Amino acid sequence: MDTSRRKIVLHETICRVFQVCLDEGGCEGRVVLSDLAEELRQERRGDTETQALLQHDEIERVIMERLSQPPKDKHERSVRYLMECYARAQDESRRAERYKDKEFAQQVQKTMEFARELVVSYSGILLQTDMFPQTKEAEARGSLQILDCMMEPTGTVLPAGYLEQFVARFEGEGLQEMFEPIVRELAKSVVQCSLLGEFHAQIRTLNLLTNHPALCKVITSAKDWIPPRGNGRQFEQQSLLGPLLTISAIPDLVVPSRPSVRKTCFSDVENRRNADVLTSITALRNAAESLASTLHMIHMNLLRKGCRQHVLECFSAAINRNEGRAKMQIDMRTTASHGYMINLGRVLLRICEPFLNDRGVKFSRIDPDYVTHGRIDFSGDTKIAATSEEEASWIDRRNASRVENFRNVSRQLGMDSGDEPVTWSPDSKDSKMEEAPANKDYHFVCESFFFTARCLHLGLARCIRYQLELLKALQKHQQALDDLQASQNISPMDPRNPQALMRERRVTELKAVISEYQELRLCFDTLLMDPAMLRPAFDFYRCLSAWLLKTACPGIVKGGLIEFPLPSPCPMEFATLPEHFVDDITTVLLYIVRTSPDILNSVQNELAEIIDFLIVFVGSPHYIKNPYKRADMVEVLHACIPRESQHGMPPPKSVQLLLEVYPLAVKHLVPNLLKLYVDIEFTGSHTQFYDKFNIRHNIGEILEYLWGVHAHRQEWCRVAVEQEGSFYLKFLNMLINDAIYLLDESVKKLPEVRETLQAMLNTSSWQAQPAREREEREASLRQTEQILRSDLYLARVHLRMLQYTSTEITTPFLCPEMVDRIASMLDYFLVQFLEYLSGSRTMELHDLEKYGFVPSELLSRLADVFINLFLKDKENSLAAAIAKDGRSYHDGLFDELARIAREYFLLTEDKVVQMERLGARVAEAKASEMDDEEMLGDVPDEFLDPIQYTLMKDPVKLPTSGVTLDKATIMRHLLSDPTDPFNRKPLSPEMLVPEVELKASISNWIAEQKGKAKQ
C-alpha cells in the first residue's frame, strides 16, 4: 500500500471513529468540521494531496472541535459520544489486524491507541470543567453520566477497557470527586428497595467499580464511608454502602421497603396454593443468594485493594453501633434493620469460609485476647464464667505485666535513657503511650472470626429469637381466636346483642392480626430457613465450638484427648469470653435441628466437634456457670433424638448415630446429664422451681433414649454403683420429688376440671349464669386444662424413669434414707389411680383421658416399680417400709391391685403373681411391726427421732446444733438441703457424729423389752 493510500485509509478510519468529515460531500449522519477543514487548508497550502485528510496529529483537534459543537437536542450527551468513539477505535484496531500491510496496521493501531487516550482525557475534562458546551441536563448530571452509561440496559455503552484507562488516567487528578458521587448515587437508587425491587444492575455496577484499586480507595475515602456519629439505624441509612446491605425479604417496620414482599408474595396465604408459596420462597432465596454473593465480592475487592483497614473499621462500626440489638427488646428506631444485619452476616460468613475447616495455623490465629483489646466492644456483655469484678481484676493484672514489658522494650530501643524515665501506667492520659502495650495487631483471620461471631449474634441469632417470639404471639392470638369461636358455639347470643357485636368485632380483629403475623413468619422463614444461610452458619458455629473447647482445654490442639472433667480453675481467657458465644451456638443449632435437619445429616463426618462441645460443657458448671445455658445444650440434644411426642421435622439420624457410638458420648453423656438434673434444682432465678420441670423433662427423655443403648445403660449402672451413697442418691431423691409433685398436682386438678365440664353439659343451667361468670369459669378451665396436660406430660417421663431404671438399679431405692419415701409415694398414687379403675370413678375416664390421664398406664408403671424392687430386696426393707406407711397402705391393697391388673390386662400373669407375693410379704411385715410396737410399749423420749417421732436405729449428732437424729432422717433431709434443719448452718454427711453410746443404749433397751415380753 503506497503512502497516499495509507493516508486516505487512516483519514477514513479517523472519520469513522469520531463520526466526522471535513466537507459536505458524502457526509450523511456525520458532523462536518468546517472550521478544522479551513484551518488545514490554510496550514497545508502547498500540499494539495493532504489538505483534506485527517492524520494522527489532528485527532486532538478533531475531538476539541467536535465537542465544541452545540448539542443538537437536550438528549445529547458528549460523554456518551466519547465512549462510543472509544468503542469504535477498538473496533478499528481489531480490523487493522487483518491488513496485509503489517507496518501500516501497526500505524493504525498506534493511532487508535492514541485516540483512546485522548478520548479518556477529554472525558475527564468534560466532566470536570465547563470548557465545552453541554445540555443543562448533562451539566446537572456531571460525572453521573458515566453511571448512566454503565446502567444502560443493553450494557454495550461502556466499552471494555474504558473504565480501566479512565481510572488510571485520573487517579490523583479528580478521581475522588468524579466517582464518589457515582457510588453514592448507586446506593441512593436502592434506598427502601426490597428483594423484589430493581437492584441487580446497581450491585453489579458497584462490583465492577471495586475491581479497580483506585476506585476502592475512592469508596473507602468517601466522607460517608463511615458516618462520624449516630446509632445503628443512622449508620445503616447514612453509610455509603448501607442501602445495599438493607435489601431484604424481611420487612423493615420502621422504613418500609418496596415492593412489599409481605403483600406481593404472602398476603392471603391461607387461600394460596402451597406450590405458589413455595415458588415465591424459592425465587426470593435465589435473589437473596445472588445479592449476598455480589456483596461478598464487593467487600472482598475492597479488602484486597489496599483498603483493608478502612473496611475493617466499617465492619466494626456497623457492629458496635448496633449493640442495642442484643437487648431483650430491640428498639428498631435506633438499630439497623433485620435485613441489614442478616446481609452483613452473610458477607462475613463468606469471608470466614476459607478458615472454618482449618484447625492448623489459621485456627491458631484466633486470639481470645481480642475480646478485651480488639475493635469490637464486648465490655457490656455477660461473661461465660467471670463476674465483672473478676474480669476487671484480671485485666488490670495483665495490663501491669504489659507495662513492664513495654518498659523493657523501651530500654532496648534506647527510649529510656535514665535521665527521663518512662512513667507510663494504665491510668496515663497519654494516649500514644497507653496504646503501645495494651493494643496489638490482630491477624485478619482473628478479626474476621470475632466480627462474624458478634454480627451473627446481633443478626441471625437475634432474628431466630425474634421469629420464635413472633410464633408465640401468633399461637397466642390463634388460641384467643379459637377460644372466642368456641365460646360462640357454647354460649350463642342474639346477633343484635351489644356483647355479640363486640365479640364479632374482636374475631375480625384477631383474624387480621393473625394474617399479618403469618405474612411476617413466612418472610422470616424465607431467609432464616434458607440452606444457603444455615449451612455456612453451621460451619461457623462448629468452628466456634472447637475454638471454645481449645480455649478451655488447650491440650486438645496438641494431639491430646479432651480432659474430663476439665481442669480447675477455669482459665480466665475462657471465663471472660462473652456468654452469648455459647448461647448463639445452641440457638442456631436448635433452629437447624428443628427446621433443617437435613443439613446435619449431610455433614455427618463434621459433627464430632459439636458433640464434644455439648457433652463437655453440659457437665462443666465451673466453666458454664449459668445453668440455663447448659440446659439449652440439653434442649439441642433433646431435639436430636426420637421421642414420645414428635412434632415437625424428624430429628437428624446422623446425630443419633454419633450419640450412640461416639466414645466421649458413651463415657460422659449420661453422667453429665444426671449431674445437670441435680444442679438445675438451684438456678438462682425466681422461677427456678417451675423451670426445672421442663429442663428435667428434656433430660429425662434423653436418658430414656440412652437407656435403650446397651453401652450407655452400662455406664449409667456404673455411675449408680460408684456413687450410690452420694450423688446418685441425690439424683434419685429429686426424681422422686418431681414425680410426687407433678402427679399430686394432676390428681388435685382432675376433680376441678371434671366439675366444670359437667356443669357445662347442663346447657340450661350453664346459660342461666351471668355472662361474665361463665367467661371467667371458661377461662379458668382453659388454664387448668393447660396446666393439667403439662403436669401429666412431665410426670410420665419421671415415672417411666423410675420404672426402667429399677429393672437394674435397685440398691439406692432400698437404702434406709430412701426406701420409706419410695414406698409411701407408690402407695399413695396406687390408691389414687385404683379409684378410677375399681368402679367408684370409672365414669370420669372418658372426659379425662384427653388430658393424658390414663390411670391404667400409670398403675402398670407403679406396679412395675414395686415388682422390680421386690425381686431384688433381700432384706425385705421394701415390705417393711410399705407396712409402716400409715397414710395410704391398708389391708387388701395389693389384692385389689392384682384384681384390677387381671381385669384390665395391665400386667402379665407372672407379674401379678409377684405382686400378690409382695402383698403377702407386706402383710407379714405389718403383723411383725404391730407385734414389735406391742412388745416395746412406750419408747423413752431420748430414743425417739425428734422429727419423725420414731425409734432411732442409728442415732447421729448434728455438730452445729447439737441435736441428735436418726441417721436415715437427717440423710434424707440432706439430699435436698445441705443445712442443719435446726439452725440452717451448712451441714454435710461427713460432719455427722455417730452416737455410739446412745445406739448401744437403744439396742440394750430393745433387748430388755423383748426379754420382758417373753416372760
Image: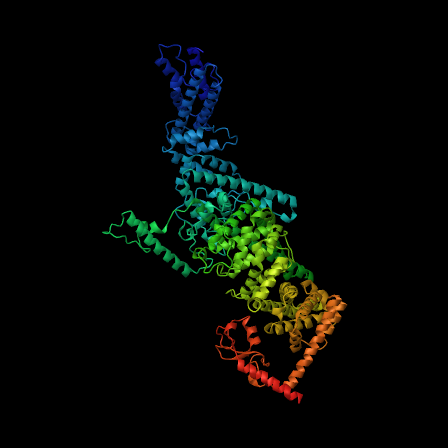
Instruction: Return the x and y of residue 1007 as percentages of the image width and height.
Output: 61, 85
Instruction: Return the x and y of residue 64 as percentages of the image width and height.
Output: 38, 23
434 or 863, nearer to the observer: 863
Direction bottom: furthest residue = 1015
Instruction: Return the x and y of residue 3 as percentages of the image width and height.
Output: 42, 11
Question: Is 962 positioned to the left or the right of 411 in the image?
Answer: right
Direction right: furthest residue = 903
670 or 690, nearer to the observer: 670
Examine the image and state in which quarter residue 647 appears. Answer: bottom right
Instruction: Return the x and y of residue 178 as percentages of the image width and height.
Output: 40, 34
Q: Residue at x 36, y 12 (%)?
A: 44
132 or 746, nearer to the observer: 746
Examine the image and state in which quarter residue 126 appears. Answer: top left
Asked whether the viewer can see residue 1012, the reply is yes
Asked whether the viewer can see residue 841, the reply is no
Examine the image and state in which quarter residue 117 appears. Answer: top left
- In this view, 684 is above or below 69: below
Direction left: furthest residue = 419
Which quadrant is home to the N terminus?
top left
Q: Residue at x 74, y 74 (%)?
A: 895
- In this view, 972 is above or below 663: below
- In this view, 550 is above or below 805: above
